């Protein structure tokens, strides 16, 4: 996306990012993870969410973009701001400004402060469950 816009009223919020794991994530065979020889969630169905775990910290940017001509900002585009690359998650409200050549869009973007690796967290959880059954 070309840098032919101005960021107005930018706000950055730091949020914890959680991932929801289903029973099937724990009880199905996995080549590179500990495999359980028991069902740690016998009262749940395979698609039921059984754990919600913190996996990383997310920065969320909300701002108004103003530029010349029609701004076509779509989810998936990226914005550089304060040394971070925010991927647009939501863009709405294309409005024309004071002149027909000006328009603005409200955006919400996201970036992670550390790698977002839910499979590493799952591997650790599976190992914990496997060890707890051995003891």
Image: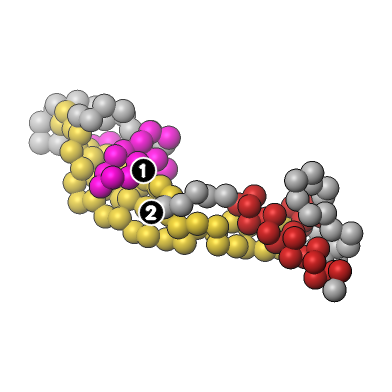
Secondary structure that dominates the magenta span? strand
Looking at the picture, how far across and down is residue 52, in whole percent?
A: 62, 63
Query: Circle 1 is placed at which residue position?
Result: 86
Query: Circle 2 is placed at which residue position?
Result: 59
Q: Nearer the viewer, residue 94 or 129?
A: 129
Q: Does residue 100 sit above or below 116 in this rendering?
A: above
Image quadrant assignment for residue 134 = bottom right
Q: Does residue 14 sit above or below 93 in this rendering?
A: below
Q: CA distance from mark 2 to mark 1?
A: 8 Å
Decide whether residue 79 is among the magenta residues: yes
Q: Residue at x 28, y 45 (%)?
A: 83
Region in magenta: 76-96
Q: Nearer the viewer, residue 3 or 83?
A: 83
Q: Does residue 133 sit above or below 92 in this rendering?
A: below
Report crowding for label 2: few under 14, some 14 to 19, many 20 or more residues within 10 A (C-alpha).
some
Q: Name the outermost residue toward the right.
A: 37
Report crowding for label 1: few under 14, some 14 to 19, many 20 or more residues within 10 A (C-alpha).
many
Q: Name the outermost residue toward the bottom.
A: 135
Q: Do labels 2 and 1 touch, CB within 8 Å? A: yes
As helix, strand or loop, the secondary structure at mark 2 comes to: strand
Looking at the picture, how far across and down is residue 115, in whole percent?
A: 50, 49
Q: Residue at x 80, y 70 (%)?
A: 132
Q: Does residue 51 sit above or below 25 in this rendering?
A: below
Q: Is residue 71 left or right of residue 114?
A: left
Q: Earlier in the sequence, mark 2 or mark 1?
A: 2
Per the rendering, the mark at residue 133 is: none
Asked whether residue 90 is in view, the answer is no
As helix, strand or loop, the secondary structure at mark 1 comes to: strand
């Amino acid at each position: 996306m070309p840098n032919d816009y101005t960021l107005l009223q930018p706000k950055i919020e730091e949020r914890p990012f959680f991932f929801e794991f289903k029973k099937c994530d724990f009880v199905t065979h996995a080549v590179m993870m500990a495999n359980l020889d028991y069902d740690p969630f016998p009262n749940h169905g395979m698609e039921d969410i059984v754990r919600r775990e913190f996996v990383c910290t997310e920065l969320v940017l909300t701002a108004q973009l103003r530029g010349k001509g029609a701004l076509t900002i779509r989810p998936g585009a990226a914005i550089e701001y304060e040394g971070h690359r925010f991927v647009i998650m939501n863009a709405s409200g294309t409005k024309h400004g004071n002149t027909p050549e000006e328009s603005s869009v409200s955006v919400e973007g996201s970036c992670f402060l550390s790698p977002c690796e839910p499979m590493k967290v799952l591997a650790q959880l599976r190992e914990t469950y496997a060890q707890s059954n051995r003891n």
